[in-house]
Amino acid sequence: MAVPARTCGSSWPGPVRTARPWPGRGPRPFPDPRGPASGPARPLLLLLPPLLLLPLLTAPGASAYSFPQQHTMQHWARRLEQEIDGVMRIFGGVQQLREIYKDNRNLFEVQENEPQKLVEKVAGDIESLLDRKVQALKRLADAAESFQKAHRWQDNIKEEDIMYYDAKGDAELDDPEGEDVERGSKTSTLRLDFMEDPNFKNKVNYSYTAVQIPTDIYKGSTVILNELNWTEALENVFIENRRQDPTLLWQVFGSATGVTRYYPATPWRAPKKIDLYDVRRRPWYIQGASSPKDMVIIVDVSGSVSGLTLKLMKTSVCEMLDTLSDDDYVNVASFNEKAQPVSCFTHLVQANVRNKKVFKEAVQGMVAKGTTGYKAGFEYAFDQLQNSNITRANCNKMIMMFTDGGEDRVQDVFEKYNWPNRTVRVFTFSVGQHNYDVTPLQWMACTNKGYYFEIPSIGAIRINTQEYLDVLGRPMVLAGKEAKQVQWTNVYEDALGLGLVVTGTLPVFNLTQDGPGEKKNQLILGVMGIDVALNDIKRLTPNYTLGANGYVFAIDLNGYVLLHPNLKPQTTNFREPVTLDFLDAELEDENKEEIRRSMIDGNKGHKQIRTLVKSLDERYIDEVIRNYTWVPIRSTNYSLGLVLPPYSTFYLQANLSDQILQVKLPISKLKDFEFLLPSSFESEGHVFIAPREYCKDLNASDNNTEFLKNFIELMEKVTPDSKQCNNFLLHNLILDTGITQQLVERVWRDQDLNTYSLLAVFAATDGGITRVFPNKAAEDWTENPEPFNASFYRRSLDNHGYVFKPPHQDSLLRPLELENDTVGVLVSTAVELSLGRRTLRPAVVGVKLDLEAWAEKFKVLASNRTHQDHPQKCGPSSHCEMDCEVNNEDLLCVLIDDGGFLVLSNQNHQWDQVGRFFSEVDANLMLALYNNSFYTRKESYDYQAACAPQPPGNLGAAPRGVFVPTIADFLNLAWWTSAAAWSLFQQLLYGLIYHSWFQADPAEAEGSPETRESSCVMKQTQYYFGSVNASYNAIIDCGNCSRLFHAQRLTNTNLLFVVAEKPLCSQCEAGRLLQKETHCPADGPEQCELVQRPRYRRGPHICFDYNATEDTSDCGRGASFPPSLGILVSLQLLLLLGLPPRPQPQVHSFAASRRL
């Protein structure tokens, strides 16, 4: 190839010294400039090819040199391309590996993935799995209703009459400080022995059930003891269910009284702080206990509401929000003379985690002022519920009003909006201790099919903000069998340590009658639930036949993923469901929106799309082709999808029967197995095997050396056709062991890697083998031993040509420490195999470049040298173009990969920055590349991130949240005469002693350490190549600080070659592009904007919100009387002495109705 004429110098003098003949075309690859094995390794430098040649302009400070012309830089680029291609042809062994596969054609078969058949089979298997759980659920619900109907209520029942295993009892007994606070007689509590069960990830007892009772409920109350009495009979049904289906996990009955009975028995996971678990606030219970809800919460913020009362209201609203699920819609408003929303939400919004967080934060900003105007509040609420132009639940409609009291009944508002049909239920909450007449509040609730509650103190909040669910359950109970439908929940974290689960739920109804001829009871007894671990569902999906980039996923009616490889919450809060939308699990586009809608609608479909995917390490974006196929999972609310790249249509399946299965010997005696033994590594290269479940008895280990040892030991015992092993995985592993060994034998063993400045050569396969040669290179091998989880492997399959992967910046040493170490750059490419008309990519091969040596080689390739050992110098009377070697003080030459990360540079001081985002190296130049469309930016949000806890904003010594009356309060006579003053005094003392309970975050109160990370949203930004493919000359216009640069893509690689003048001054600094993750204080994109564009979803297809026979006479009869001064003073004295009083049962009208 002719070298373009240059102002100074002659053409390239000919082939450079190499260790062996060069078989390729074009200029021969450069050997290591230091010669073979030349001395100790020096700091490695990334290759940096200059591509842009600008007009002949004289570089400042170098009168004899000008900026390289475009054809010169294109010539440098071609030399770089040829050098890379030459080394990969010699050492990569792509062609040789193709030949090896063909030579061993008799050892494997090519199987086809048929998407439609695959997805239908998996959907059918999941349906069968869930159907077995449904049958168990129905047996439990029927039995519970029968047991309760046959039960006779006992007024005089005592704790010693009931024997049960108290799941929290062991922790209480073991607590050295718990002797004085134990509330129940231990004579009624069983002591059990437990055995470890890997299926439950826990110690269990299969002979008994366990009982969990919330901390704020008295175990010895008559209601609870009767509940324990009749639910004891469920134990035998739980045991029989497990006998029929040994795969059953937790079977749970959550009672409307708060009692949880679950099987098998296991000790409760006692938190380090207060245990706030209440089954009635769990996502699965809420979903099973009532139909979806449209709720408007209105809060009285008139001037009479201040101090503790306002604080109680804020806390009550937050607790009320926690009773809502993603099937519900809600808005919150405050009112005095006028009503206004507390947040930016102007209409009902989905009660998802992020929207509820916005409400909770907004509620804290409410300020009391003005006069009470019930009419304004109710009119606002009814208008919200009548807005039909928005997405909403369209089922139960309700208004929840929190107030300290008032006289207006606003009958005219109810007549206008709600009567005579009364389609909206009204629930009223009298908050705080006061002497107001509560009759108007009772009347509002009773005349609108609702309920009246009192919240005199903080202890009454949790119980009274969830009891409304019993009222909503009435139409379900009255509907009878029609309402007995199993629902499957969102994904959530199991409270007993099972991990991520979904739960099938079925409501349990009270079938008793108050007397002969009396109306049917309309109380819901509770909800029955059976857990299914996500891992059990994943086992039904194909694991390794879909290739590294193929996968199965499933979504529910909300579009949330049930299965997806990107469903990886970094931290979970068992109080909240794990809600990751399909469009957030992947990079959103119009095609995926269409697919998601079709799946939610329960349709079948298939679509090939061009889309963007994020690399496994989340540093890169690739544009790829994917085939999506989807079908509904019958009898559930889920839909299943399959994603396949075109190159994964076919896969290899080892067929070793003729060669080895006739040998009835341990696998370790087979021929190819010897190449897995460490004794062969020195000659054949180090072998990493993917940590897959090859056999049931194989002990897993995160250490690959230990895992290989366990594997070899097991293979000494099992035969190739052993039924305890997965023959597909095992045989493919052995097949790939032999094939990669032949690559060593034919290509790698006789090559001198040092001659071409290589640290290692490697091959990784779908079968799970990663072979690294030579053996010593394995010491610095940091890639994942599972090829399917290795970023270089997956990216190589999705990209044509050679994929460069610089070391991550965190893995680099400081420049001074590089003297005695080496750093490498991975270059990999997929092996495409064509067998007849079937094409597949079963392996990836590559090399690891010595960074230091290739940095030097890069300078030579991007220079005007006329001789290998003598750089071209320009005389005083001649005029030359600058190059990347001689003029590195004036000329910056770099190679940047497709993610914008520095790969090689001609600047020695940038060696330690290899692997960094280039904007951190040269912000000015990176911005110019972005502005000139060499790079495109993609922003997305990670909703599964974990962040360190933020330090508390209140740094004072006093307990947070304790109300301190102001001077105005002291001067206010009403403040002194109100009984609320005593409540304030009580709250103050409770706060001083137990402020950690009052103010603890629920997650912390339930046992999380102070330093536990919490879930948060991180903004991610990735860059990828834009539309520009040709050479490009440009100038960064900055006046006296302007810079010339040239950029050009290197063919058949993921590299951009950039040549630029070094900056003359710092006055041209522009905004720096950011690539690293950043925390979003507002939890992602602006929620107020997102709710204006809600994503498509569907609610449950059946709604139970009305029944003509419903008896609404039970609507709350609160006791409004001033507290006893003597009792309150005694209570405070007990608190000051540190002697907690014996807790009393919560007394409200529902307790009487629960006399079962």
Image (spheres, rainbow, N blue to C red):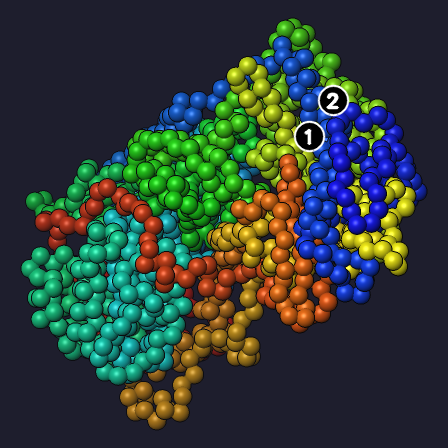
Tag 1: amino acid: Val
Q: Which residue is drawn at 15% across and 50% down?
A: 1106
User: Which x, y percent locates residue 370?
Assistant: 26, 83
Q: Which residue is drawn at 16% across and 74% down?
A: 375
Work out whether 664 lies above or below 990.
above
Work out whether 469 lies above or below 790.
below
Q: Residue furthest bottom?
A: 971
Tag 2: amino acid: Leu
Which disc is residue 627 wearing? Answer: none
Q: Which residue is drawn at 35% across and 75% down?
A: 366
> What is the secondary structure assignment of the residue under circle 1?
strand
Q: Residue at x 81, y 62 (%)?
A: 62
**Residue closer to the observer: 778 or 28:** 28
Give the alpha-carbon distance from disc 2 to disc 1, as whole Å. Answer: 10 Å
1053 sits to left or right of 403: right
Name which of mark 2 and mark 1 comes first in the sequence: 2
> What is the secondary structure assignment of the residue under circle 2?
helix
Residue 672 visible at all = yes
**Residue closer to the observer: 737 or 1064:** 1064
**Residue closer to the observer: 705 or 391:** 391
Q: Which residue lies furthest to the front in this view?
A: 877
**Residue closer to the observer: 176 or 429:** 429
Neighbour tally class for label 2: few under 14, some 14-19, many 20 plus, Cα within 10 Å: many
So how many labels did they put on this image?
A: 2
Question: Which quadrant, please, contains the N terminus?
Answer: top right
Return the residue at label 2: 743
Return the residue at label 1: 845
141 sits to left or right of 882: left
Q: In which quarter of the image is residue 712?
A: top right
Work out whether 420 lies above or below 240.
below
